[in-house]
Image (cartoon, rainbow, N blue to C red):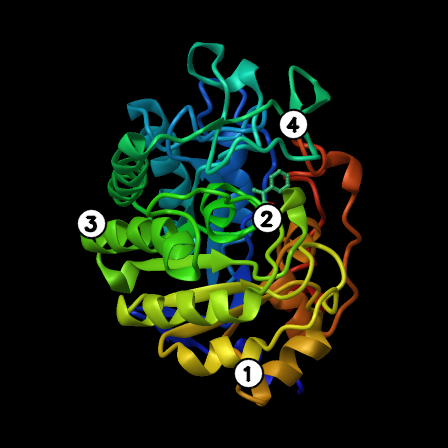
Amino acid sequence: MSTSKLLEPFKLGSITLSNRLVMAPLTRNRALEGLVPNPLSVEYYGQRASAGLLISEATQVSQQGQGYQDTPGIYSKEQIAGWRKVTDRVHAQGGRIFLQLWHVGRISHVSLQPKGGAPVAPSAIRAKTKTFVNGTFADVSEPRVLELSEIPGIIDSFRQGAANAIAAGFDGVEVHGANGYLLDQFAKDGTNKRTDAYGGGIENRAKLMLEVTKAVAAEVGSERTGIRISPVTPANDVSDSNPQPLFDYIVDHLNALKLVYIHVIEGATGGPRDIAPFDYHSLRNRFKGAYIANNGYDLALASKVLSANEADLIAFGKLFIANPDLVERFKRGTPLNAPDKATFYGGGAKGYTDYPVLESAGAAE
Ligand code: 8OZ
């Protein structure tokens, strides 16, 4: 079968994944009480534990890092306890799970921020995008410039979030460096107009992403630290005038930190893979750890890219929302359920834990 390599185990740092399918981080906005994952989330992640690796939905490291209603955090005791139930279930099902550490930067709204203050950003440039708050879509708020003196606190919130994730039983953490959130806002020149040590040339703009990642890896171990990047995505109104040298530089430095993986969104997040020219092989070749490829992969493209050794693991998003047993479906070559966009963000069990699975292999034969 053409799926063979996808279904082979893979050694990721000190753990072994049972196959090369990764469930991508997926925002679901269902942490209704105290921004804590609930029993439905335990069920949801447990249902998908046959993926080689699950990556949690983006999880804010602080109240300031939140940008949408009902996204979970990893900074309170209750949140750690809630996540512990998720990791216990996934492990009981034989799965592995990393937590994605998130700070939204300017993609937020005053109603979510401490004391109703402005969201923080590298520069005071408002994003032309909306967020979801108080049950409705709203323009993101005008951000304020993050002061130099606040940067150590940002780094420390990621470090503490990583420590909390390990305390909650996660196998590792993924730094969210993608999709126009804080670290991507600092890295790219469309959003970073600073004139201090964190703005200007590539080295300065990449500094926060690299310092955060270094602090996280020092806290939990580089073999338990990955990062997600999206060199050319226009998500959340982010842009860079010359992404290739920027991301070549970033990946060279992530390689020096001996990170366990880079997770690369190729093209426009959830959209066209060919939105802008970019040489992903350059990243693959620079980085000695695992390369997780993401964005618009299906079985055919995943199998092709793995056999050409252009990636080690493939992350699927929407396919995992709709198909908890995606691994089994790929194995058997059975049709896939279609995802229902109306239930992606917010709500309860509908579109979350109620997608049908195949009859067990024995019963089907
Ligand atoms: C969809 C809706 C809200 C947030 C990302 C964390 O794009 C997200 C996100 C996706 O990385």
Q: Which residue in the structure is indicated by mark 1?
A: 310
Disc 1 to disc 2, C-alpha distance: 30 Å
Q: Is residue 115 left or right of residue 155?
A: right
Q: Amino acid at mark 3?
A: Glu
Single out the mark in the foreground, 3 or 4.
3
Residue 271: name its quadrant.
Answer: bottom right
* SS type, badge 2: loop
Q: CA distance from mark 3 to mark 2?
A: 31 Å
Of marks 4 and 2, which one's residue comes earlier in the chain? 2
Between label 3 and label 2, give the one nearer the viewer.
2
From the image, state whether disc 1 or disc 4 is nearer to you: 1
Q: Residue at x 35, y 30 (%)?
A: 147
First of labels 3, 2 by sequence position: 2
Mark 3 secondary-structure assignment: helix
* Residue position marked by numbered label 4 in the rendering: 348
Q: CA distance from mark 1 to mark 3?
A: 30 Å
What's the amino acid at mark 2? Gly
* Residue type beneath disc 1: Glu
Question: Vertical placement of 97 versus 150: above or below?
Answer: below
Disc 2 C-beta below 8 A from ligand 1 = no
Amino acid, disc 4: Gly
